Image (cartoon, helix red, strand yellow):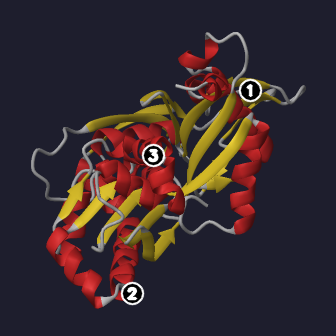
């Protein structure tokens, strides 16, 4: 450890639409919702992460909650900068220091991001205190996090289903050969469930409740092993305006999510159709790897496997696969420098 290391700290960030994760010293030190609460009168940030999430959907007119990222990219520059800064401040290893160290960051970005959107991520990180900023594509970070050797001359297909985007990429020789990025992912699933509850049960539920339904009984198939029990959903009756409760089954949620999952399946087939034949042969042998929070939806791996007629493997810890890969790339910057943007 040199003198330079005392003044420079390395952190890896998975700046996600739904959650932001930060790795410092090879450990996930921040895992918080990507949301901020702002005082409308003073425009000051009141809360970030878990505290802001608890306020979401329950605020009065003086407070608003914002999700700074939309569809995997920064939608509110100011709020995202504050969110990154506050989350970095909460890192235990940096709080105990007498002086603020220089920060070297690796941040993962969607593969379909534009140069303008890339610039916004870089600027937000620099304003939050980064001296050096490196960007790495999400599918590449996910592959590294899963344990795939991205540099070998072999085709691997990665599907990363996050909050805002689904990233589908075929990787070989340390590069993305073909990719498809669609704005259908966890947030769209949540909206589908909220719409279904309104249309079929006349029940108005907020985003946090719809998200909870997705976690508790969300399913991609109507025929799964070990199905979850029925779930009681509380909300506001659209006809009477009174609070009410309805019982929902996983089969109903599978119907609600069907169209969005079909769009993901179509995107996967499109990516496969663009794949060079030699890499397609490799994918036939190795199958498809899935990461991201959306891949935890019950039966989704089975449904994609049926559609593609290929084996589908979900990462061991899908929520953290991307940030883990980003952390590995940061730790081995010389080895993975060619992946940085």
For the residues labelled 2 and 3, the Cα–Cα distance comes to: 31 Å
Of marks 3 and 1, which one's residue comes earlier in the chain? 1
Answer yes or no: do the residues labelled 2 and 3 have beta carbons within 8 Å? no
For the residues labelled 3 and 1, the Cα–Cα distance comes to: 47 Å
Residue 332 - label: 3
| Mark 3, other Cα within 10 Å: few <14 / some 14–19 / many ≥20 | few
Let me know if residue 199 appears in the view. no
Compared to residue 1, the image places residue 96 above or below, namely above
For the residues labelled 1 and 2, the Cα–Cα distance comes to: 50 Å
Compared to residue 312, the image places residue 335 above or below, namely above
Taking the view exactly as shown, the residue that stands out farthest to the left is 225
- The residue drawn where x is 35% and y is 75% is 268
State the image coordinates of residue 188 (x, y, percent, origin top left): 49, 57
Of marks 1 and 2, which one's residue comes earlier in the chain? 1
- The residue drawn where x is 20% and y is 83% is 281
Relative placement, left or right, of 60 versus 157 is right
State the image coordinates of residue 134 (x, y, percent, origin top left): 62, 51
Relative placement, left or right, of 125 versus 245 is right
| Mark 2, other Cα within 10 Å: few <14 / some 14–19 / many ≥20 | some
State the image coordinates of residue 71 (x, y, percent, origin top left): 59, 58
| Mark 1, other Cα within 10 Å: few <14 / some 14–19 / many ≥20 | few
Of marks 2 and 3, which one's residue comes earlier in the chain? 2
Q: Which residue is mark 2?
A: 274
Q: Nearer the viewer, mark 3 or mark 1?
A: 3
Element type at mark 3: loop
Element type at mark 2: helix
Q: Which residue is mark 1?
A: 60
């Amino acid at each position: 450890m040199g003198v330079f290391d005392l003044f420079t700290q390395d952190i890896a960030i998975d700046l996600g639409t739904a959650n932001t994760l930060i790795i410092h010293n090879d450990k996930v030190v921040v895992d918080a919702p990507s949301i901020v609460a702002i005082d409308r009168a003073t425009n000051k940030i009141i809360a970030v992460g878990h505290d802001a999430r608890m306020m979401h959907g329950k605020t009065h007119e003086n407070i608003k909650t914002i999700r700074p990222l939309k569809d995997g990219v920064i939608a509110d520059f100011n709020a995202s900068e504050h969110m990154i800064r506050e989350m970095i401040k909460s890192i235990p290893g940096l709080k105990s220091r007498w002086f603020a160290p220089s920060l070297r960051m690796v941040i993962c970005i969607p593969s379909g991001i534009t140069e303008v959107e890339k610039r916004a991520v870089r600027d937000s990180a620099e304003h939050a205190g980064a001296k050096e900023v490196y960007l790495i594509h999400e599918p590449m970070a996910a592959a590294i996090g899963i344990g795939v050797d991205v540099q070998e001359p072999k085709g691997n297909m990665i599907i990363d289903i996050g909050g805002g985007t689904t990233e589908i990429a075929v990787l070989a020789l340390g590069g993305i050969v073909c990719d498809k990025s669609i704005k259908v992912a966890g947030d769209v699933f949540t909206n589908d469930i909220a719409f279904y509850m309104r249309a079929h049960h006349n029940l108005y539920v907020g985003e946090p409740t719809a998200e909870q339904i997705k976690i508790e009984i969300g399913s991609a198939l109507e025929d799964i092993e070990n199905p979850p029990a029925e779930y009681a959903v509380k909300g506001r009756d659209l006809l009477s305006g009174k609070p009410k409760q309805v019982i929902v089954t996983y089969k109903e949620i599978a119907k609600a999510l069907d169209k969005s999952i079909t769009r993901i399946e179509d995107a996967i087939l499109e990516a496969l159709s663009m794949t060079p034949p030699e890499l397609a042969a490799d994918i036939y042998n190795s199958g498809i790897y899935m990461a991201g929070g959306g891949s935890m939806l019950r039966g989704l791996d089975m449904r994609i496997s049926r559609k593609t007629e290929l084996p589908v493997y979900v990462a061991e810890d899908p929520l953290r696969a991307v940030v883990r890969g980003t952390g590995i790339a940061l730790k081995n910057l010389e080895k993975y420098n060619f992946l940085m943007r």
